[in-house]
Image (spheres, rainbow, N blue to C red):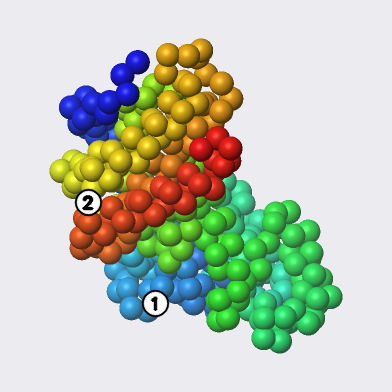
Amino acid sequence: MNSQFDEKNYKKKFSDEFDKKEAMFEEVIQKELVISLLGDVNVGKSSTINALTGKKLSDVSSYAGHTKEVSLHRYSENVVIADTPGLQDINEETSKKAEDFISNDTDIILFFFNASVGPTQNMIKTFNSLKKLNKPIITVLNKIDIWYEGKVLVEEEDYETIVNQIEKETRQEVIPISSKKNFHIDVLNNEILNVLEDEGKDILFLKVSKYKENKVKAWINGASITSFGIGVIPVPGADIIPLTSLQVSLAMRIAYIYDCKASKKDVMSLIGATVTGSLGKQLFKYGIQALKGLGWFGGPFGTGATATLGGSIAASITYGFGWACNAYYKNGMNLDLSEVGEVYECNYREYFHKKVPTTVR
């Protein structure tokens, strides 16, 4: 069993996987995402978008769309926020035009209720008419800070009464927020991502989201768990090869949401500073020596200890690489590769020592 790292084979595998992933990824990021905001005047539609993105809606110039009744704001080349008129300002003609736009162009609707007003008959009527369009709707209850003192909920009865009324009328879960106080904006962010994931457009929203690093963490953890499954059947020296596709995809997604382009040369430079670099090889060698210490080479195939260790090495490599990518792209690709290597080492060792019992190491 060869315990040497085959760098030539790794680079060939990397190049092939990068080309495949790039073609698939380009298809995804060519799509457009349109988010429509509906609710009464002064319900906090704009301030909610400000809180989600960190960018003021008023600072993003509007442009003409299919109808002048809807203000369109392009947050990135792929993301459009459609601000509709306040419900009380909608007449029959305007309503029809706005409805046509939502029906034909919108991917997801954020429908806002005001905590100080509750679910009025007009709002419920409008909500029910929107449900007939079969578009995903997220129900938002804004301005819940009226029931708080500081960060403490003091008017719990009023809070629960309004939430229950809205959920009863709309027949769907309400997300209570305060865009003014930044309460539960991350919860709303996650719900938007959950809905868009079904459409394959979650990554488009992440590019403009203020909470993108929360999702990066989830991606890295998920990729590490998958890597563990790959590494449970260890083939030292070739173990890292099946992880290439996973790592390339991870690098591309992280680069995109930080508004960077992950070129083949760029990602290979990252891999050279981490997985296949001298530091990566040292850590890999350390894992091989640990496997040898457990009698894996020349002995019977796979004990529980060797399987755990093999999986943990694969998971730790991916975990370290993911956080190295995050540091690099978050800093606009301006981080020195030696610093990237340090991020990799720190996170590799952290994950490895956290997941592998001392008796196995």
Give amino acid for label 1.
Answer: Lys
Name the one closer to the observer, 176 or 297. 297
Q: Quadrant of residue 275?
A: top left
* Residue reaching furthest to the left: 265
- Residue at screen point 75% across, 79% down: 153
**Of pointers 1 and 2, the one earlier in the residue sequence:** 1
Q: Are marks 1 and 2 in contact (CB under 8 Å)?
A: no
Where residue 122 appears, as percent x and y from the top left, is: 67, 69
Q: Secondary structure at mark 2?
A: loop
* Residue reaching furthest to the right: 157
What residue sits right under mark 1 in the picture?
56
Where residue 350 appears, as percent x and y from the top left, is: 47, 51
Name the one closer to the observer, 199 or 301. 301
- Residue at screen point 57% across, 46% down: 134
- Whole-number angstrom distance, CA of label 1 to CA of label 2: 25 Å
Give amino acid for label 2.
Answer: Lys
Where residue 213 appears, as percent x and y from the top left, is: 43, 59
Compared across the picture, whether 330 is left or right of 142 comes to: left
Name the one closer to the observer, 175 or 269. 269
Residue 264 visible in rendering = yes
Q: Secondary structure at mark 1?
A: loop
Name the one closer to the observer, 19 or 100. 19
Up-down relation of residue 27 to residue 161 (above or below): above
What residue sits right under mark 2 in the picture?
261
Q: Give neighbour class at mark 2: few <14, some 14-19, many 20+ (Cα, 10 Å).
A: some
- Residue at screen point 37% across, 62% down: 208
